[in-house]
Image (tube, rainbow, N blue to C red):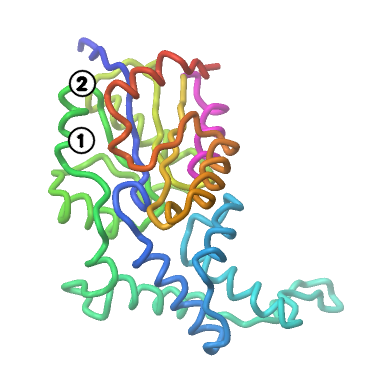
Amino acid sequence: MQESNCSAIVVFDIDGVIRDVTGSYRRAIADTVEQFTNQAYRPESADIDALKSEGIWNNDWEASQELIYRYFESIGQQRVSATPDQKVRSLIQIDYNALVDFFQSRYRGTNSQEWNGYICDEPLLLQLSYLEQISAANIPWGFFSGAPHAEAAYVLERRLGINSPVLIAMEDAPGKPDPTGLITAVQQLEQLHQANAATPVVYVGDTVADMYTVTQARVKVSRTVIGVGILPPHLQATPERRDDYAAKLLAAGASVVFSNVQELTIEEITKLTINNDQSL
């Protein structure tokens, strides 16, 4: 079978890139932390940003749990201690399953058949026509997200109307910054479009963890892997916040940072693949 002459393969993160999760996932994090600290602490947006900037808290359930732990530590409680036989035990008791259930009751809602939670009101950050333009330029595209598969598919299929997208989600691969999910998405796109195995890869994300995923992928594969950072809407409120976060994405491995994903035009993709030679 003849290989397709693709100039690049583009893989998109979803949260903060395809949809604005300021009033959904982030609101659910704040609700959950407040609930499990007995209404003593509700994290501000800056608190969540600071945690996410550490690059290892891509999973919002785990991020919620970590913020709860840190609150109790801030008032003098210990997270763990060693027993006389050197076994480690937790002193701060958090029922993780109950935490997940509460988070989901806010994000998905209370109706498991017809979701009625925060997910229903997420603003979209791109139009389907943008993806159609990329397809017309013979550039394969797909998605790698740390969100649960059903929640990622909700926005892609139900909101955007994409039919059977290539999607690697939480259940399909280890969490970021492990690059396995990104590499798997690329492999699926290669097979689907008969793309050359040396085709440059562009990964588009909005977090430090996304850019760390790019840098780790470069170690795993013998091809050019380019990170494109997207500024989430809530971090564009002031020039100072915008510039500070852009600098963090660049320091973490982004080659360029845009305010909106649709600024990554076909011309910009071409420019990036020409100017970046990061293959091993």
Q: Residue at x 46, y 15 (%)?
A: 275
Q: Position of residue 136 (x, y in %)?
A: 15, 24
Which of the 4 image quadrants contains residue 103? bottom left
Query: Residue 131 got which mark?
Result: 1
Residue 229 in the magenta stretch? The answer is no
**Predominant SS of the magenta segment:** helix
Quick check: 201 left or right of 210? Answer: left
Image side of residue 266 versus residue 72, left or right? left
Task: Decide whether residue 210 is among the magenta residues.
Answer: yes
Which residue is more in the foreground, 264 or 152? Answer: 264
- The answer to whether the residue labelled 2 contacts the one labelled 1, judged by CB atoms less than 8 Å apart, is no
| Residue 158 seen by the camera | yes
Q: Mark 1, residues whose alpha carbon is within 10 Å: few (<14), some, or many (≥20)?
A: some
Residue 211, x across and y down, in percent: 51, 39
Q: What kind of residue is marked 2? A: Asn
Foreground label between 2 and 1: 1
Secondary structure category for the residue under label 1: helix
Magenta range: 209-223
